[in-house]
Each structure stands twice: as structure tokens, then as C-alpha cells.
Image: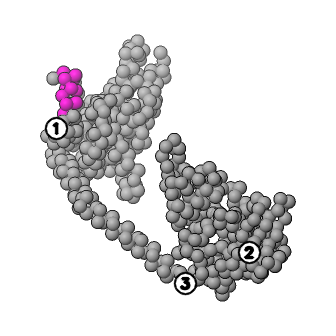
Amino acid sequence: MTCEEFRALLEREGTAAAQAGAEHLRHCPACEGELARWQEVEAQLAAMGEEPVPAFLHARIMAHLRASAASAQRVPLKVLRPVWAAPLLLAVVLLALGGVGVWHLVQRPTAVPAGEAQSAVTAEAPPPALLGKGAPVPVMAQKVVAPKQADRPLEVKRSESPVPRADSRAQGEQAKAVARGLAVNQAPEEQAEVAALAAPAAGEELLRSGGKPTGGTDTRSWGSAKQQVASEEAPRAAQLSRPPAGPGPVQVRCQLLDGEDFPRATVWLPEDRVPGIATVWEVVVGEGGEVEVVDTTGTPRPEVASAIAQRLPALPPPGRYRLTQAPLPDY
Amino acid sequence: MEAGEAAAAEALEVERAKAGDEAALEALVRRHEGDTYRLCRRMLGDPEEAMEATQDTFLRVVRALPAFRGEASFRTWVLGIAINVCRTRLTSRAWRDRQRWVSLSPAEAERSEEVVPEPSDPRPDPERRAWAAELRRALGTALGKLTREHREVLLLHEMTQLDYEELARVLGVRVGTVKSRMARARAALRVALREVWP
């Protein structure tokens, strides 16, 4: 063993290397001195483990532990005591509900586009013309005579908005709607109906159960059912038209209802080509994809038919439908 | 008392402390507070900081006690918590702002010299004793120049006498890593002691 090897062994093993290098140490006083120094260092380091500690160390540690234990016990006594927890929770919930109600009351007369987005019934944005000042007259008119929630037909939901909103609050609410993917302000029963629309297999069971998740062999949760509906909704969403961008006549959102009053498509039409409030026009979709529209006086409206055919990416199945203005969301 | 009996007695005390026996907890604290304080003292280099770190360590010990399964010895477990407390303090912003070094100031080295008892020496050679005193002072300074990793492994092995397997548990690394880290720490210490070890 060379001196270099012995010193490497010393670094690797400490003074325990003395045994392995005993033969070398007998003939090398330098390495013997090196070993003695390391032994001294180790002895000094070990002596640090015997240093006296402050006399009050134990008392301070125990006082710290007791103080911490006492403060930890005060928290549940003051805040989390069950007697106070329930009223506290109730008060918070009531305050939150009150705040939402007041906000809706304040917003109701002026912010229809925002309300549309806030209701999250549909994330489809109105045309830019509706966002200008004074433009939403037809929409306000709709709102006055909007049918009651139980009577009005449902709308198919979208999960993205084609046009940016001018109203920042609406944007925020719209973003929430997008994040949720489905209607959030609807009762479970309504959600179930929408689910039935979008995905009959998933939705019919929810309809039967009144919008609540069912037990039995179907192990999907309500949330997972909604997710499935959202994924199955994709082809359905293709039947929603987008409002034309840019300047032009005011656009009104209309629906094609089937024989059971279910909306089979939503389409934005110019305000001069839509049925009046609470008015229904007949629409026939032929086998070849031709569209015919007849108004309440029996007059054919080919311009409306062509608008529908142009703006719907995919027509609903052949059959008879009714064209109406889409109801406003329930505030 | 044999080592095995002592370990069994301590395991009983741990169980009693888990059940809420304050006397058992106090006995455990009393048995391990010295090692913990000294380790913190050498890791942090400041007596007051070491005191706070020791308090924090035992607070964490009490909170984590229900989760202690006895896979390592109680002492090893406590020292592991102490190392973590020291690491947190060393890396905290407040700590860096204070810009303290470990035992770098002369006054600190002097205090260190005062409290360290001389190791028993069968040959009370005056020259050797002088060199030992110089070595103690230099060691205090040299430890402060080591990296945290090297200081941890040296102190735990040489000062608290943990073996490599216990060190691996405390530091959360493999035994091989402990050995290589120890070798690098010794080499670094050798360099840091150049002043007294030409």
C-alpha cells in the first residue's frame, strides 16, 4: 500500500482504516502522523457530543410544548364547537344566497346579454350588433313575455363561445359556463331533459329519476353521467348555428322544436325573418334536405328557409318542426 | 441496563406517551434533548437559534408521535426531525437575511472552546494539549465552512455516533450514498483544517 492509497482509505473509512493499513503504518511515520491527527479530529468531534447544554433547556422545551398544546385546544373550543358550527354555516349560506339574489335583481333590467351568459343556459353569444347600445330591443321584448320555466322549451347547451363578449362580467360567467360544460343554473330535472336530448341513453334514465342519479346496476355518478352527456353532446352541438359576425341586421336566436316541444336546433336569424313573440311557424325538413317554412298566415317564407339551411351546419332529421324565438333564460 | 432492555423500556415510554402520558413524554424529551440541542447548535452555529430549533424539533416529535412505528430507534427518529428543522432554518429567507455563519466569529469560537471539555488523554503532553486546543478552535471554524450536507453527515456520524445505516435513515439516502458523502466530507474537512493541519 502506498501513502496515497492509505490516505484515500483514511478519507473513506476514517480511523478504522488503521487496521487495513497496519502493515504500511509500521514503515511510514508520515502516514502514522496523519492517522494520529485524524484520531484527534474524531475525538474532538465526539467531544462536541458531550458539550454541556443550557440549564433551562428542558424547562423551555416543556413550556413550549405545553403552550402549543393549550393553543391547539383553544381553536376547536372557540370556533369548531358543534353548537356554534351549524348556525355559523347556516348564516354563511344565507348571506351567500342573499348576495346572489340582490345581484340578480340589480342586473335584471339592464344586462340581458350578461344574464344570458350568467344563466349558462347557452354559451352561444349573440351577434356583435346586439352588444351595441340600444341594440337589444328584440331581446328585451322577448324577456317580457318569456314563458314560465315549466312551459318553455329547453335549449341545447354549448361549451364554447364563438364571439367575445363586450361585457366583462358576462365573459367571466361565460367562462364558468364553459368550464362546467353543461347548464349550471338549471334544476336537475331540466338538466336531465337536456341530457335526454343530447344523449338519449344516458338522459332517459335521468329523466325517469327526476334528474337524480340512480342506483342499481348503473354505477355512474351524476357527475360522470353529465360528463358522458357532454362528450356525447358533440354531434348535437353541430346543429347549433353561429350568429354571423360583423355589422348587419339584429340577429334573434330561434329554435326548431319537434313534435314533443324539444328543441332540435338553435339558429340565429335576422330579426325581419323570425316569427313574432309567442308565434310559431311551421318548418318541414324533407328527405333530400330541403327546407320549407310557412308562417301563421299560411304564407311560404323561402327566405327564412334558406337562412335556416345556410346557418345550420347540419339539419335535423327529416320531419315537421316548429320555429319559435328562443326563450330567455329564467332569472 | 443492557442496550436491548433500554430499547424495550424506551419503546414502552413511547407507547405511554402516545397514549397521552405526559410523564413518559417528559422522560423521552429529557433523554434526547441534549443530543438534539448539540446537533442543532453545531448545525446552526448559534446557541439561541439552536434552542429554538430544539423546541421546534420536540413540537414536531409530539405532533408526529402517533405516526411513529418504531422502525428506527426513537433517537434516530428525533435526530432526523432535528436535521429537517435545521435545514428549514438554514434555507429560510429570514435565516439568510441574518447572514450568519456557523461559528465563524472569534467570540463564538471562544465560547465553543470554553464549553468543550477536553477529551480524556492518557498522555498529558503539553505540546499535544496545546495542539488539541488549537484543533478545537479550528474545528469550530472549519465546520462552518463545510456544505450543509457534509456538516450533517460528519456531525451525525462523529458527534452523535450514528452508524451508516442509521445515517441513511435519518438523511433519507442509501447507505452507499452515506459512505461516499462521508468520504467527501472528510476530504473537505481536511482542506478546511489546513490552518492547523498543513
**Label 2: which residue?**
A281
Using the image, determine if residue B142 lies above or below residue A306. above
Which label belongs to residue A190? none
The residue type indicated by label 3 comes to Pro
The reply to whether residue B65 is visible in this rendering is yes
The residue type indicated by label 2 comes to Trp
Question: Residue lying furthest bottom in this view?
Answer: A134
Q: What is the CA distance from the residue labelled 1 to the residue labelled 3?
A: 71 Å
Q: Are marks 2 and 1 in contact (CB under 8 Å)?
A: no
- Splitting the image into 4 quarters, where does residue B170 fall? top left
**Label 1: which residue?**
B24
Seen from the viewer's position, the closer of residues B178 and A264 is A264
Task: State the residue at coordinates (61%, 66%).
Answer: A154
- Splitting the image into 4 quarters, where does residue B142 fall? top left
Task: Output the chain of dot 3.
Answer: A
How many residues crowd mark 2 within 10 Å: few (<14), some (14–19), many (20+)? Answer: many
Which label belongs to residue A109? 3
Secondary element under disc 3, as helix, strand or loop, is loop
Residue B28 is covered by the magenta coloring: no
Q: What is the CA distance from the residue labelled 2 to the residue labelled 3?
A: 29 Å
Q: What is the CA distance from the residue labelled 2 to the residue labelled 1?
A: 87 Å
Q: Position of residue A58 (x, y in %)?
A: 17, 45
Using the image, determine if residue A30 lies above or below residue A146. above
Q: Position of residue A82 (x, y in %)?
A: 25, 58
